[in-house]
Amino acid sequence: MSKTEAGLGPLDGAVESSSLYNPDLAPVRERTWGTYNYAALWVSMSVNILTYMLAASFIQGGMDWKQAVVTVFIGNAIVLVPMLLNSYPGARYGIPFPVLARSSFGVLGANVAAVLRAMVACGWFGIQTWIGGEAIDVLLRTVWPTWASVPHHTGICFMLFWAVNLAVVLAGIKYIRFLQGISAPILLAVGLVLLGWAYFRAGGFGPMLAAPPRFTSTSELLKFMIPALNGTVGFWATVSLNIPDFTRFARDPRGQAIGQALALPLTMTLYSFIGIAVTSVTVIIYGTAIWDPVQLLARFHSPVAVIVALLAVLLATLNVNIGANVVSPANDFSNLWPRRISFKTGGVITCFAGIAMMPWKLLANHKTFIFGWLGGYAAVLGPVAGIMICDFYLVRRRRLRVRDLYLRQGIYEYSKGFNWRCIGALCLGTGVALVGLVVAPLHIFYDYSWFVGFTVSFVTYWALMRAEEPIDDPALEAAD
């Protein structure tokens, strides 16, 4: 298929002078990423502290290791579906997430979807930065024990690590690419060290995985497992939306799909097993489930081991934070005002918004993390995913006019830049998913917030847009 057939012909002066255009949001022309690149991307993003903590939180919540592993695998197999569906238009047209959202939300309404996605990323940025700050705090207490008596010592370390992240953002994308190449091996090594420690302390895999579940009945298990599964889907609900930011660089749609399908569920499950196994051992050794690996490392008796491990965690956390939690919101904020907000400026906004999200509250315990943070934003991002997938595959029939995505008064103008039917579907899906927070008999809607929001918004958007006459335009070629 030629670039012209795919809607990627030369962008004329009207597009390049448009208020909706800047080079960071333009379609990518040189595609260089293949199957290996996308497999490596998911390995580097999946092998991170929060993957460990997500799985470990299931043990803290009362699951045994088998129940936790199954929950992680099923959740990631489910989220892979919308991930691949949203990947395709990015790979086909070379456009990022906020530009793709203009097709369904309108050229200005896309800012609604972009800001929702960006604010969640800011929250994740703050969470990762808090973890890095904790690591610095433990490191300083190991080297300099009196550091623990310094007022607000953890908060000071948080701000120190935040400043390091900001410096990398200001330095530019080339440093981000350098860090991406070294994070996964480092965190994998730390995980294996913790797994080895757990193996020897427990006396083998048998004892270390022998911790029984705390649930006494199937109904009691399901009461925890359903929101845990919803949280696992919500964990990657963010990237399932902005995956076009990465697949726009794909040489072909098939290669990126294979790379993601192979790497995402497998890597998430394998690295989660480390968190599950090690946390199970902490129940045996310490009498309580320690789900935060930084706090677990603080209990090690060898200062050298603690220092080396924490330095590795710091470096890898910095990379994951920049790669997973800055790239997307930087594009999203740039979409708000393309002529004034560059990628770098968007990254700076992300850094400051991360503080405002108060990550120390989101990580207070496994309940606030799974039920509050993951379940809460899944109720918002599930509807966005439902709308975008319905729009591209059912309403547009996999055809887009790329030029009009960057212009006012084009086919995606709707009503002064906003598709109010789309906004209505978004509000209804989110409202139904969140109603369980205030209506006790309907709490199951919140337990399934991503699934409920996705389904309600998908169906509503399809029903509202069916009255829209399909665009009969020879410039819009059907996808292969």
Image (tube, grey):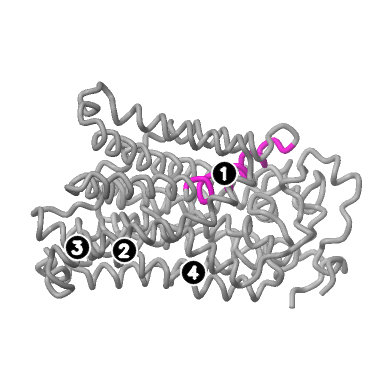
Q: 216 above or below 410?
A: below
Q: Which residue is mark 3?
A: 198
Q: 283 above or below 144?
A: below
As drawn, the residue found furthest toward the right would be 13
Q: Which residue is mark 4?
A: 80
Q: Give the left or right position of residue 180, taking residue 211 as reference.
A: right
Q: Give the left or right position of residue 245, taking residue 417 as reference.
A: left
Residue at 64% in and 37% down = 344
Q: Position of residue 208 (x, y in %)?
A: 15, 68
Q: Is residue 143 magenta?
A: no
Given residues 4 and 250, the one toward you in this image is 250
Which residue range is magenta in the image? 321-338
- Between disc 1 and disc 3, the foreground one is 3
Q: Disc 1, disc 3: CB below 8 Å? A: no
Q: Give the left or right position of residue 199, taking residue 55 as reference.
A: left
Q: Which residue is mark 2?
A: 192
Q: Position of residue 212 (x, y in %)?
A: 11, 68
Which numbered marker is on residue 163?
A: none
Quarter residue 359 falls in:
top left
Residue at 41% in and 53% down = 432
Q: Secondary structure at mark 3?
A: helix
Given residues 336 and 460, the one toward you in this image is 336
Identify residue type, mark 2. Leu
Identify residue type, mark 3. Ala
Which of disc 4 and disc 1 is earlier in sequence? 4
Q: Secondary structure at mark 4?
A: helix
Q: Disc 4, disc 2: CB below 8 Å? A: no
Which of disc 1 and disc 2 is earlier in sequence? 2
Q: Which residue is mark 1?
A: 329
- How many residues crowd mark 1 within 10 Å: few (<14), some (14–19), many (20+)? many
